[in-house]
Amino acid sequence: MPPRIPNDPRPLQPRSLVTQQQVLDAAVTALIEHGYAGATTVVIQQLAGVTRGRLLHQFPARDQLLIAAVQHLAIARVEATRERTTWPEDPGSRIDAAIEEMWSTYQQGLFWASTELWLASRYNDDLRQALLPAERLLGEKIRTATDLMFGRELTAREGYTAMRELVNTSMRGVALTYSFDRRKAGTDGHLPIWKATARGRLLAEYVDGVVDADGHDGKG
Amino acid sequence: MPPRIPNDPRPLQPRSLVTQQQVLDAAVTALIEHGYAGATTVVIQQLAGVTRGRLLHQFPARDQLLIAAVQHLAIARVEATRERTTWPEDPGSRIDAAIEEMWSTYQQGLFWASTELWLASRYNDDLRQALLPAERLLGEKIRTATDLMFGRELTAREGYTAMRELVNTSMRGVALTYSFDRRKAGTDGHLPIWKATARGRLLAEYVDGVVDADGHDGKG
DNA sequence: CAAACAACGGTCACCCTTGACCGTCCGGGC
DNA sequence: GCCCGGACGGTCAAGGGTGACCGTTGTTTG
């Protein structure tokens, strides 16, 4: 019937891309501000300053939109960890600076956007399957970024890898408590613990056990 | 007008309590299986095997129900951490056993129920205000439970408190990744890291740095 | 320039969820 | 036994979210 098989893929007009970026940015913002359930198509279209038809033309289904947002978010998170140029010379100071730099990435909204998607992926198979490879890749990049923070010397130390895992996961666990306990993150009681842990693992001359801060948090 | 001021609080018939427990249990189950947004009043009433009128009579508003579920959940979580009676004699073995015991609590559905509430509390002020004191209390009880796992001797060591915080938060951060990466928790690559950390902090003779497992996970 | 199709604007029907509402049943005090 | 109020069953209206649908505008290709 069709005299011409649809093998004429008109090369996707550039304005489409603009729209898509706007929408995806808005989707991430919506995730941060309203959570997964609250990231309604209406909310997103309003945040994007886009009409309903326009959004639905680019993303016919909400699920597809959020899945696309996964990729968009991963890119945004990587870009958010820009490399710092100047680091302290002294290893101890550098460790402290690196820890604080790491911790600062958990204060950004992107952390919440990710967490929202993670939780939602428990009930959405498609979302989970899109998330898994994206997060693996992202994790790799973030590990690389962490290594850059500590520098070539410190990353070569024996216990570095284990320390990196321990601190990164711990930071995530602590950051999660900020959802219901909104305190100032800059002075979190866990910071000295993380620093001491990193120092103990990476610096031979470091005397262990000087820090016993009672940085309690909600959960066990 | 009312000849009798409503100071005649008919002593709340016992069947009410039964209903409430059924509903609250169902609410927690719904949180585990469907998440906060998916914990619909209809889903809960079906899980509880209760009619709509019955549920709505006991909990007129969904918000109040979920907030009541918070308290219910806290009790359930504490009861879930029953004390083990037998522990290894050797300090090193006891540490390993305690770590595994701690980790096992993050495999229960109650962890997900809590996390769902935590995330939801970011957008629900009432929920957050109900959550905060409950979690503080719960955290205290769980810290006590953890102390019991390690025993009087080990808890007295210098770095114990910091270690407890570090491991607990790290476990939470790791457990979160299981939402999209469903692997077997019993052999998680982080277990040796936690054990080595605890040993390093609590045992003087422990040689640090023997573990450098690359237990990667998704996020940075 | 004209055809063809991508991109877009805007509406509408369907579905799900909530909670108000009203009628019924049960159980205890008088 | 009577009466009252708590406990419950079941229905319904209202609100919000989704995506199909159709008409319109813009752009590229022949």
Image (cartoon, coloured by chain):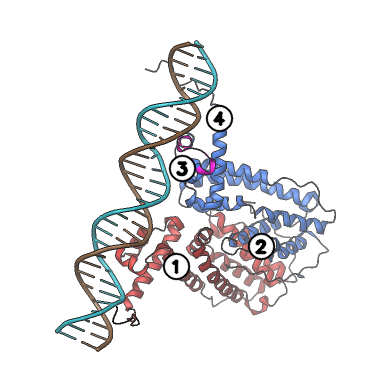
Chain colours: A red, B blue, C cyan, D brown
As drawn, B20 above or below B97: above
For the residues carrying marks 2 and 1, which lies nearer the camera in this image? 2
Of pointers 3 and 2, the one earlier in the residue sequence: 3
Residue B62: which disc? 3
- Residue D25 lies in what quarter of the image? bottom left
- Quadrant containing the C terminus of chain B is bottom right
- Say whether residue B52 is magenta: yes
Helix, strand or loop at disc 3? helix
Is residue B32 toward the left or the right of residue A76 in the image?
Answer: right
Please tell me whether residue B52 is drawn above or below residue B15 in the rendered image.
Answer: below
> To which residue does mark 4 refer?
B15
Q: Residues within 10 Å of mark 4 (few under 14, many from 20)?
A: few
Discs 3 and 1 share one subunit? no
Dot 3, crowdedness within 10 Å: few (<14), some or many (≥20)? Answer: some
* C-alpha distance separating marks 2 and 1: 28 Å
Q: Residues within 10 Å of mark 2 (few under 14, many from 20)?
A: few
Side of C2 where B13 appears, left or right: right
Q: Which residue is tagged 2?
A: B184
